[in-house]
Image (tube, grey):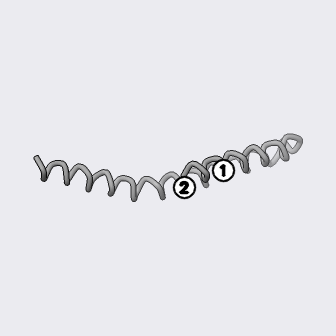
Amino acid sequence: MTSLMVSMTAFIAGIKDRLASEKGATMVEYGIMVALIAVIVLAAVGPLGIAIRDMFAGITGQL
């Protein structure tokens, strides 16, 4: 997961540097990047939530 975050940060930094002179489309492109990051976060939260729920169910069962 850490390598994914580093790759994404490098990708965003590269796009930001490349688009520094193009002000008209920058807002749209940042919006697209934010939407993409939101989709990635939502995709990661689903399985993580299930794993945490199962972990707490196991702890409750042991008590």
Count of labels in the image: 2
Please tell me whether mark 2 sits on a helix, a strand or a loop.
helix
Q: Residue at x 83, y 45 (%)?
A: 19
Marking on residue 47: none
Q: Amino acid at mark 1?
A: Met
Residue for badge 2 = 40
Discs 2/1, front: 1
Please tell me whether mark 1 sits on a helix, a strand or a loop.
helix
In the picture provided, is 50 more to the left or to the right than 8?
left
- Mark 2–mark 1 contact, CB under 8 Å? yes
Residue for badge 1 = 8
The residue carrying pointer 1 sits among few (fewer than 14), some (14 to 19) or many (20 or more) residues within 10 Å by Cα, namely: some
Task: In this rendered view, identify the residue nearer to me: 50 or 27.
Answer: 50
Give the Cα separation between the discs numbered 2 and 1. Answer: 11 Å
The residue carrying pointer 2 sits among few (fewer than 14), some (14 to 19) or many (20 or more) residues within 10 Å by Cα, namely: few
Q: Residue at x 65, y 47 (%)?
A: 6
Q: Amino acid at mark 2?
A: Ile
